[in-house]
Amino acid sequence: MKKLCGYDLNGWRDFASRNWQIAADGEEAVNDNTTEGGVFGSVVMVGDGKASRLVGGAQAGLAPHGRGGGWGALGSDDRRISVRSLLSSPDPSVLALSHAFSGMFVGAGIGVASIDDVTDSSEILQERLLSALRRSKISTPLLVWRPVLSVLYGLSVELIQKPCRVGVINHVDRGFTVQALAVKNHKGQGSGVLAPERRNFGQLIECSLGYEYLAQTALSSLEASVSNHWSAPLHTASSVGRLALGLETKPELLRMNNGDWEALEPPNKLSLEFPDLPSAILDLLRSCDLVLVESLTEGAVRQHIQDHFADALGIPLVSLPPSTVAKGALVASTRMNKREPVYFDFLPQISTIVQRPSGAESYDLIDPETTLPAGEIYRSPAPAQFAIQAGQERFSIYLRKQNTAKPRKAIVDLGLKLSGTVPVELSVEQAPASGRARIFVYAESLTRQFLVDWDSAEELVEDWSELLTKLEKPEPTVPSRLVIPCSKALWDDSVFEVGFAELVNTNANVVEVDWKALADKADDRYARSYAVSSDGQLPSEIDGVTLANLRKLIDQALTHLTLRLSGNLDAGNDSLRFLTWLFRLCPNDVAIVLLDAWDQQVSGHKLFNHPSHWKLAYQGFGRIVSDKTLELRAIHKILQKPIQNWVWQRETAALAFMLSRSETAPRQLTRQNVEVLAKRVLLEFRENLGTTYNKFHYAPFLLVGLIRWRMVDRHALVIGTDPVADSLAKATRRTLADLAHHSRASAQGKYGVILEQILEELQGQGSNPDLLLDIYSGDNL
């Protein structure tokens, strides 16, 4: 005998049905039976420490755990979690859900569980429910929509005997869902089998008769029925659930926080109001051959619901018993076991955007006419095709999911720079009611497949049609701001050297701080990263002691700097180097010191008494400045100097750092400033022609930083419309031609692709949003 089970785990009134029972002699026999897991079910923790375990089902409903302080430590709130809170959690516990299932029945080979048919049905919840069923030792789990299970029950009791259109009204948390399913004849083993087909999401009628509202109304009614001196926790009373669902209520003893008992005399009915029904939903139901109503309620509540729908529709309705969904789930398990069709389902559409010769076009990855048998995996028959341009390490994909408000933009990191154009395909794999779709990018020439994560993709402000319009007539691109990431690896000790964390913790409590070691480690670069990001962020894993010691060292470095400025200490610039390599984590006072020092470049300064020291004064400022007022002062100071007098490692570097890394610095520029800076770029490009390009490092940064002025004037610096852009493009092409000489192969490898992508930006069609990061990665800056 294959053991089969169907679950209706809803948290309001749980049921389970199985195809076997245990006789008085302990033997198992084939016989369908249904159990109730409890009203307003919970999972409780019994025992403590390693001996603790979770219990669900009816046993949890009887347990005193989590029922208030009157039960001592057992009554603690953390001892009990409601099934409803599990099902509504954004990240539900698989372990707790598995005990909610096994608390009713355990041991089935095939298990089917219900899910509500609503447009915002959580795909993460679907994945957790399937995992919980597997953890409950169900080898073949399946989730099926509530209206489908209602129809399967109707088929099993011969309410439905021929192909027809069935309307289903399901009672849910926020009201009622309405669905119309086509029952069709499908081939089974030897003969035709009637099975429902689902073509759309259910429609929600949100109203005050949803289970959530009934529960709140019942609790409020109980609170109104007791005295002001009542101290027992009413929310733990079984009367709340029974009253909400129309079940008979009885006097109930509740334990107060002091251990005494109080008798609760609950009311026996609720005052309910039914909303008007939308005409479109009434028309949908009237178009059906049969209308089923499924609710977990009983008594007056159930009759009120039935009467109101019947009056509104003016047609007969069939009221299904509360255990309908669980029994329908058992029918589904039986069909799976016999390899008969359970039901057929559509898949929510997933779309992307492809570029055609005619422009941007929405492309559906799922055939809208396809319906799938339960459990079958769908794969895109015609994947979307893209071409990724040479030089790119990553590219963007736009995605839209049906019934999701906003589209998303996913970044696919290829892990290498492409040497030529690479075709890729985007496809989808998904099974009905089985969690999140798997979205793949496959690059045959790279023999690699990439998984696109919808959840981590950026949600866009535009809707799909606005996004298509925007891409149809794209505005000139704006290069992304450079953010150099931080790396935990630099904080950890390695086989070869001490980590930054060890240096920080060691030096925080010594008399003579090794500022050189700290500065050298802060300046150390690993995999395009530093110990501290260019935004001053630290790896999240850094412990509190290390953070406190780092703050202590920053304060000591400031004191060290102050003593040097006052003439009371003669020392080198290592403490200053340490501070500036903390990027924007460095206090603002240091940026002020450096900016003021620029004015004493001719007369001399206490911190910078050698020409080579001024590189630190300018570049250090560019690394740490985060105040837009200081940015503006720095821009004005530098622009007061003739551009031919600038030094590439000082003025050019400082401005390149600010314009490439800051969100505010490009906005401080005027058009006149832009034109002056463009002349400096042209000068540096020209001066490097015919050389080894050892002094070219900051010129591309400055140029791309200038292009970011499009945040102010979106159509600035575009070839064909801006003469400055034309001059910059000409200089870039001349440099590319110069780099083609065999003697400059090293420089060509470093700057060739970068300059091609700068030309794309000057055309307003940048293909690499991380261009600045790629320029940085190619140089030791």
Image: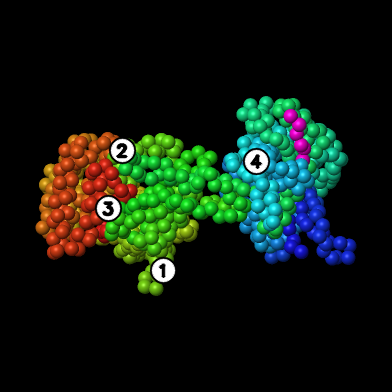
**Residue at (77%, 56%) from the top-left corner?**
18
Camera-side mark, 1 or 3: 1
Q: Rounded to the nearest whole Å, what is the CA distance between mark 3 and mark 2?
A: 35 Å
**Residue underneath mark 4:** 181
User: Callout 1, which amino acid?
Assistant: Asp
Q: Rounded to the nearest whole Å, what is the CA distance between mark 4 and mark 2?
A: 46 Å
Callouts 1 and 4 close, C-beta under 8 Å: no
Is residue 46 rendered to the left or right of residue 632? right
Decide which of 685, 547 is in the foreground and name it: 685
Callouts 2 and 1 close, C-beta under 8 Å: no
Residue lying farthest right? 24
Q: Quadrant of the C terminus?
A: bottom left
Specify which label sits upstream in the sequence, 3 or 4.
4
Q: Does residue 182 appear in this view?
A: yes
Specify which label sits upstream in the sequence, 1 or 3.
1
**Residue underneath mark 3:** 620
User: Callout 4, which amino acid?
Assistant: Leu
Q: Regarding mark 1 in the picture, which secondary structure is present there?
A: loop
Q: Rounded to the nearest whole Å, what is the CA distance between mark 3 and mark 4?
A: 68 Å
Residue lying farthest front? 190
**Residue underneath mark 2:** 475
**Residue 312 lies in quadrant:** top right
User: Callout 2, which amino acid?
Assistant: Glu
**Residue at (43%, 51%) from the top-left corner?**
383
**Residue at (25%, 47%) from the top-left corner?**
760
Task: Count numbered badges in the picture.
Answer: 4
Q: Does residue 508 appear in this view?
A: no
Residue 493's disc is 1
- Number of other residues with Cα within 10 Å of mark 2, as a class: few under 14, some 14 to 19, many 20 or more: few
Q: Rounded to the nearest whole Å, what is the CA distance between mark 1 and mark 3?
A: 27 Å
Q: Regarding mark 4 in the picture, which secondary structure is present there?
A: strand
Which residues, given as a range, are shown in magenta? 315-320
